[in-house]
Amino acid sequence: MSDDPSLARWRDEFPILDRTVYMISNSLGAMPRAVAQSLAAYADTWATRGVRAWEERWWELANDVSDRVAALIGAPAGSVSMHENVTTAEAVALSCLPPQGSRRTIVCTAMDFPSMVYLYRGWQAAGFELKVVPALEDLSVPAERLAAAIDEHTAVVAFSHVLFRSSYIVDPRPVVERAHKMGAVVILDGYQSAGIVPVDVAALGVDFFVGGCLKWLCGGPGNAFLYTAPSVRDRVRPALTGWVARQHPFGFDIEDDELRRDGMGMMNGTPSIPAYYAALPGLDIIRQVGVDRIRTASVAMTQRLLALVDEYGFRTVAARDADRLAGTVAVDLPDALPVSRALKARDFVVDYRPGVGIRISPHFYNTMDEVDAIMTELARIARDKDYDGHQSSRSLVT
């Protein structure tokens, strides 16, 4: 398993690895075995404790999950809130930041996840203007290109730490420095970095950081999060709010304007309790393994993928500089979409994105043998145009 054989013991914790070469953790992380027991515990609690479960554990469960997230991203306890998805989490952040005077521009990039750009465009109804920074031909957005778009009219700089199509790592530091110099607020989207690239939100000095447990944190859907820097939390209030955020929610007073001072003060309606149960095992595993070790294993496997891309004569937009490449190598070739479907039919689990090809995303639980096997099978399918066959090539994996 890369150059760290001690990681091999974690493979038994992920049942899907017994049946597939699972290489798409940038889309959906493999489910830890313990999730089934955790969700069963949720069901049993609901069945046996009923509404009493709220006061016995459920009401504060969001804080339990968010503090585990905080420990993985360098955030202090009580500074992270949980949300249904990143679009909602970022909408909460934006709701704290009304446009003021001539400072009303949101700066983002053309390579941000579309849901975010849809959100920013919708926010123009509140008086914002949108500036979208174009990408280079290789679909990267270098930090200096983004920083150059920030001026005295910029209210918010919202951008992806890792670009979802190309896995290009945008260095946040010069962007944060320029934004703060110009008086703008930074919202960093870490959905494709948290769990695969070491992140220290406090050291970076970002104002907000959004992400989710769905991908590299192996926590399933419904578990997005929002970090709000304590210095920011002291001076803003979310307009997108709800009863869960109140100091006295069970007073049911429509005049209650007193928010909680911990992460739950940035939440809104009733939380998704079963999603939290699902997130706990993955967060615990990532903490035990350590993101630094995960990054080391990831770099070794992505560099091997790049070598094989060159060996087979394929194309890729992936950065050759390991410091600029996160956990995914996109392999582009003729008929990439049917090739990706054929791979999945053979239990090599990948996905396809227009413009970049087949995304291959090994995580710490994958092995170098699997990296070699998936590229061997990909090359064979492409060579033979064997898009419809369903024979298994799992014997290639040792």
Image (tube, rainbow, N blue to C red):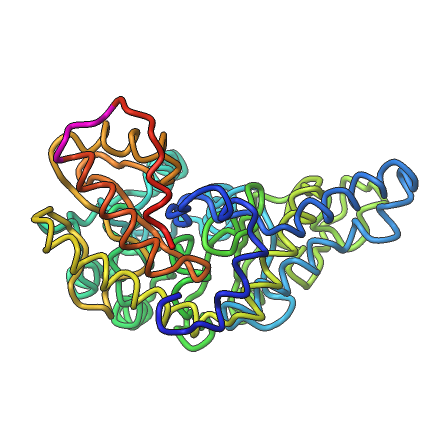
Residue 84: x and y in percent read 57, 41
Q: Is residue 233 left or right of residue 114?
A: right
Q: Is residue 295 left or right of residue 276?
A: left
Which range is magenta?
A: 383-387
Question: In this orientation, which residue lies closer to the viewer: 278 or 98?
Answer: 278
Residue 18, magenta (yes or no): no
Residue 302: x and y in percent read 27, 60
Q: Is residue 163 left or right of residue 77?
A: left
Residue 384, magenta (yes or no): yes
Residue at (84, 46) in percent of width and height: 54
Residue at (53, 62) in percent of width and height: 228
Name the quarter where the N terminus is drawn.
Answer: bottom left
- Looking at the rendering, which quadrant does residue 148 occupy? bottom left
Observer able to see residue 157: no
Rendered position, 227 above or below 122: below
- Looking at the rendering, which quadrant does residue 288 occupy? bottom right
Question: In this orientation, which residue lies closer to the viewer: 63 or 120?
Answer: 63
Q: Is residue 10 left or right of residue 165?
A: right
Residue at (12, 35) in percent of width and height: 383
Residue 125: x and y in percent read 38, 33
Residue 349: x and y in percent read 38, 40
Name the quarter where the C terminus is drawn.
Answer: bottom left
